[in-house]
Amino acid sequence: MKKICTIFFLLISSVTNAQSSSANLLELDPNIIAAANCNGALFAVSMVNFENGILNEERARVMLRTTTLAFWLTATKHQNVQHLAEYANDYDEFFSDSYESTYDDLIDGNYTWDSQAEVDVCTARIFDPLTSVTAQDMQRSGVQDYFQFSAAVAAEADKRFDYILKLMEAMQ
């Protein structure tokens, strides 16, 4: 199962935006990198909890929707949509690396209280964009309708989640 999720996220990172994959790390926004890392770690914890029966499918799905929305709200608060489209693959690599590292630590028994403290910081970080994004932040970044944006993010998160479920089912 670990390899399935890792392969899935590597595939996603390679096809998200064919024009991206910048070699210039200095073009990336540190706030968005941090958000991508948090999103990956939180989703890994959620998926392990789902696999172990701690979270049911709907709650795991909600976690992915919420962390994904928080990531995009953070991203649009710091950069415009053009920047995000141009560097989508680069940011997705940070998400994938964080997901894989956290998932592996959980599965391999290397997840520690320090790891949990990092995830707790990420949990706290996702609440800021969810509760403080302004209409001006959204408009400045090129997003005109928050509700349409939120629905689109949720739909994409659900597609990812559904695909993971299909992979899990195929591997049984």
Image (cartoon, helix red, strand yellow):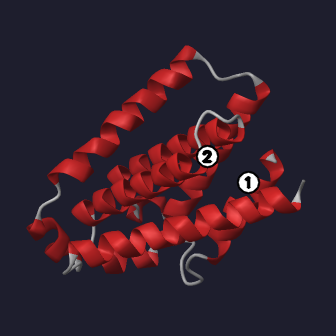
Q: Nearer the viewer, residue 21 or 99?
A: 99
Q: Residue at x 43, y 67 (%)?
A: 154
Q: Quadrant of residue 108?
A: top right
Nearer-N-terminus badge (1/2) = 1
Disc 2 crowd rating (10 Å Cα; few below 14, some 14-19, many 20+) is: many
Q: Residue 29: tell me if it is visible.
A: no
Disc 1 crowd rating (10 Å Cα; few below 14, some 14-19, many 20+) is: many
- The residue tagged 1 is 5
Q: Residue at x 53, y 54 (%)?
A: 61
Residue 75, image x, y percentages:
32, 61
Q: Amino acid at mark 2?
A: Tyr
Residue 91, image x, y percentages:
49, 61
Is 84 placed above or below 105 here? Answer: below
- The residue tagged 2 is 99
Q: Nearer the viewer, residue 54 or 116?
A: 54
Q: CA distance from mark 1 to mark 2?
A: 9 Å
Q: Residue at x 71, y 22 (%)?
A: 110
Q: Amino acid at mark 1?
A: Cys
**Which residue is outermost to the right?**
172
Q: Nearer the viewer, residue 158 or 118?
A: 158
Nearer the observer: mark 1 or 2; the answer is 1
Q: Can you tell which mark lies on residue 156?
A: none
